[in-house]
Image: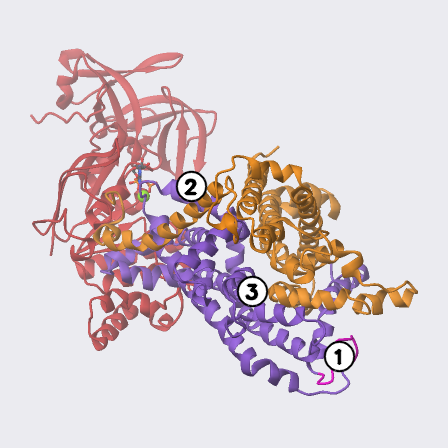
Chain colours: A purple, B orange, C red
Amino acid sequence: MTDTRKSPTLALALALVALFWISPLSWVAFNAVDPLADGTLRWPQAFGLANFSKAVAGESGRQFLNSVYVALLTSTLTTVFAGLAAYPLSRVRIPGRNAILWALVLLRMLPATGIIVPIFFMAQSTGLLSLTGVALAITMINLPFTLLLLKNFFDTVPLELEEAAYSEGASLFRILWNVVLPMSRAGLSVVWFFSFINAWNEFLLPLIFVRKTADFPMSVGLFNSFGEHSSVDYGFLAAYSLVYALPAVAVYFLLRRNLSTGFAGVGVKG
Amino acid sequence: MFDDAKPWIQRDWKLVAAMLIPAIAVIALLLYMAGWILVMSFTDLALFGRKATEWSFVGFDNYERLFKRRGFLNSLWVTTVFTVFSAIIGQNILGFAMAAALRNTGRFTKSFVEGAVILGWILPDVVAAYVWSATFTENGLVDLAILQPFGIETRNFINDHPLFVVIVANVWKGAAWSYILYSAALDTVPSEVVEAARVDGATPLQRAWHITLPILRPHIATNCLFITISSFVYFPLIYALTGGGPGRKTQVLSIFVYQESFAVGKLGYGSAISVAMVLIVAFLSIFYVRLLKDPR
Amino acid sequence: MTGVVLNDVRKSYGDLQVIHGIDLSIDPGDFIVFVGPSGCGKSTLLRMIAGLERISDGTVSISGRVVNDVPAPDRGISMVFQSYALYPHMTVGDNMAFGLRIRRTPAERIRETVGQAAEALQLGQYIDRLPKALSGGQRQRVAIGRAIVREPEVFLFDEPLSNLDAALRNQTRMEIARLHREIGATMIYVTHDQIEALTLATKIAVLKDGELQQFDTPDRVYNQPANTFVAGFMGAPPMNLVAAEIIAGDGGAAVAVLERAGQPPVHVGLPASRKRLVGRRVVFGLRPEAICSGPVGSRPDHAEIDVDIDYVEVTGADRIAVTNFTSGPFYARLPADADVHEGRRARLNFDRDKINVFDADTGARIAEETP
Ligand SMILES: Nc1ncnc2c1ncn2[C@@H]1O[C@H](COP(=O)(O)OP(=O)(O)OP(=O)(O)O)[C@@H](O)[C@H]1O
Ligand SMILES: [Mg+2]
């Protein structure tokens, strides 16, 4: 019906959309590859990877690893906890199940900024004002949403499949491992991806949890260096931004196929 | 307790019960923290100074202060403007329009536009803040590419129109979510229904208005609920872009909470703001859920 | 080989009882079909035998062993589900091998068994495909293959053909019959398709509202239904049921008076074996195919009735004449060349010995007296 070749208005609109999304990145891209970058928007005066080598060396490299640590720990914990609890919530009529589900729905709405104070104090009193503490806190905040999401996915696994596996002699573990989990791959991917990206991007928690620059994840690292305007090395900052963005983009494109089915589930069930 | 459950669950019921423990512990912890906030909002607890140890209950003082001092009402207004323009209007409408427009375009166009939009979504908040700060700064992309060619005086948008900048940045950052949901939702509209309307002579606009939109109503409500709430409590992009300033021009509620609690150190007052935020979010949720259920 | 015995089996969901005490004794090697209307409890009963549903009361025994508390995998059964329940992420071969792998069967032996089953079911070339790349009939065969490789003593099928089209259903039905002949295992099969029931079963169990109505050979279920429910349920079109009052005729012979709407009642003399019915209100049951048409006196031994034909349905081999004999429709299955026409009057006749008689109040069959 509407083909871009037949409808020039549509083609123009889509071109503008693409331009709106791509063009702001030009500044970062130009400055990152320009060792002589001075922060103005201009075509690169020279090409070189010097900025990138600064952005992955020394403290910056540490910060990269810190981010990897927080993101992997968070996504693993979230997926495991949510997966474990989602199965009984989906399959067993536990007394109080509805109360739990309602609590989850409400807690999912609870803004993280709203409970940041108790989180901070709790981390302080348990000695968790650290990257591990950040990961645990994000896991906690993510859990209501991811748990509900995964429960919805488990709900769609036909019970007959589990019955078939059971009557063939499969144990609970086998049923979970060989039937439920493989069939919920899309849901697990979405949950893993969500918690990974959330943790990778998380800014507020490390901002208040972590004091030493060597312990910063990249979000706070980047924020910190672009606050100090006078002595900013713009080429370095641009390269650092790209290095910081790359894993998130890569994870998305690696999981893309699984995610698109998963997102459909998010939309319908809410 | 597992009497009615499936036999493989009954057989290993202890394991199944154990599987629930981490989640229940986390839920309990979250509820505990929510309760903590509520209690704290009735005290004058401070982060540092004398009130950090010798705090006392002050009744509704903190809540009164919400309405007597300028800070909260200003933030509420800023947050509302930000949410309405960036989420409900910007992300929602743009996301829907793109989902509809990209349904019938060629593979390449679709992948390219979709990839660009999703890139904005995937980029970390602080990077996005950095990108938009560079775009709207004096002699940034907007000045060079739009204002200068038309002979308009260049300016630093972040100083002159800060709320506009964060709204644009949030549209850029978040429209992909609405796009993804609406793409999936449009796939669920049965093509026979739309074709039937076409056979009946409905124009494309009539088909969209009378057929597609009503069918997608629950998806639209769900999406609006989601993006409204997430924009309402959004923190990192705005904070990294403007820090809430200049002055209080972009001080949304989440930044206000953060600053009152951790910069000013008034934890009691900060908690009262948090409680107010939670109540507003709950109210919004109820509103959208009503919208979701009630067909007419 | 193994028999299955159900002893006063009951099932309740909370306060709601859905199976009300069923006794059934299934001989080794039998092919039993459970039929009944939707919601009558066929699947529930089958799943209790399978061990997928707790038995609220009574006992189920397999090979003389009470299995109420034996887990499903240890009962020596295999189940074929209505939706096939194939694992969508496993290939055909892996689907069939899954149960064997769990039992730690040696790999060599698994390959052999699965290979044989796949050959027997003509699935050899699909062994590495995923279920979604198979047709409905092929998926069905994989499900059966998965049941076979475990070499169970009892096969359980829950409406295994209901997702197939008519042609495929016939073909698969014959394959299941062949499978039963070859393996000789006990099979229990749920369906609400009477053709499947009548062709496959060695014995049919007819259920209604969680109660057993009749358990007998297909021939007897069809020709001598235990009550009016079974009579009306089996056969398409179903058995004609007509209310009658029995009076004493000449010499004490029983004569049935069939009331007709707006027309004089019909009198039908009954054979001597029905003498004791005199004075009772009963229901006559007459199979449509027991009815013939023909000119007056063409079959002197038959009872004759005159009817107005409302409608004639030509099905190829037969003409099905529908009339309004008493209250509901009354069907006669006649040969294709029968001289019956819509809107005309016709004379039908039937063999008095083929009349089934049921009690008007209880609906239970009243047997013929043996002289
Ligand atoms: N989990 C349950 N809780 C309550 N009632 C149930 C449950 N499962 C089944 N029933 C009821 O038990 C009765 C028997 O159900 P069953 O599935 O055995 O019927 P069926 O004969 O197999 O029907 P169909 O031909 O439609 O498959 C039905 O009335 C059904 O509503
Ligand atoms: Mg059933």
Q: Residue at x 27, y 41 (%)?
A: C42
- What quarter of the picture does the N terminus of chain A occupy? bottom right
Look at label 3 and name its amino acid.
Asn
> Does the magenta segment cover residue A41?
yes
Residue A52 versus residue A164: which sits nearer the camera? A52
* Left or right: C200, with B172 as reference point: left
Disc 2 crowd rating (10 Å Cα; few below 14, some 14-19, many 20+) is few
Q: Earlier in the sequence, mark 3 or mark 1?
A: 1
Check disc 1 and report the residue beneath it. A38
Q: Which residues are magenta?
A: A34-43
Look at label 1 and name its amino acid.
Asp
Label 1 residue SS: loop
Q: Residue at x 50, y 41 (%)?
A: B43
Query: Disc 3 to disc 2, how far (Cα)?
Result: 71 Å
Please say if C350 is above or below B248: above
* Whether marks 3 and 2 lie on the same chain: no
Query: Disc 3 to disc 1, how far (Cα)?
Result: 27 Å
> Does the magenta segment cover residue A269?
no
Q: Quick check: which quadrant has ligand 2? A: top left
Check disc 2 and report the residue beneath it. C315
Check disc 3 and report the residue beneath it. A201
Residue A147 versus residue C229: which sits nearer the camera? A147
Q: CB of mark 3 within 8 Å of CB of mark 2?
A: no
* Whether marks 3 and 1 lie on the same chain: yes
Query: Disc 1 to disc 2, how far (Cα)?
Result: 90 Å
* Left or right: B65, with C162 as reference point: right
Confirm or reject: label 3 Cβ below 8 Å from ligand 1.
no
List x then y, in percent, for residue A65. 49, 76
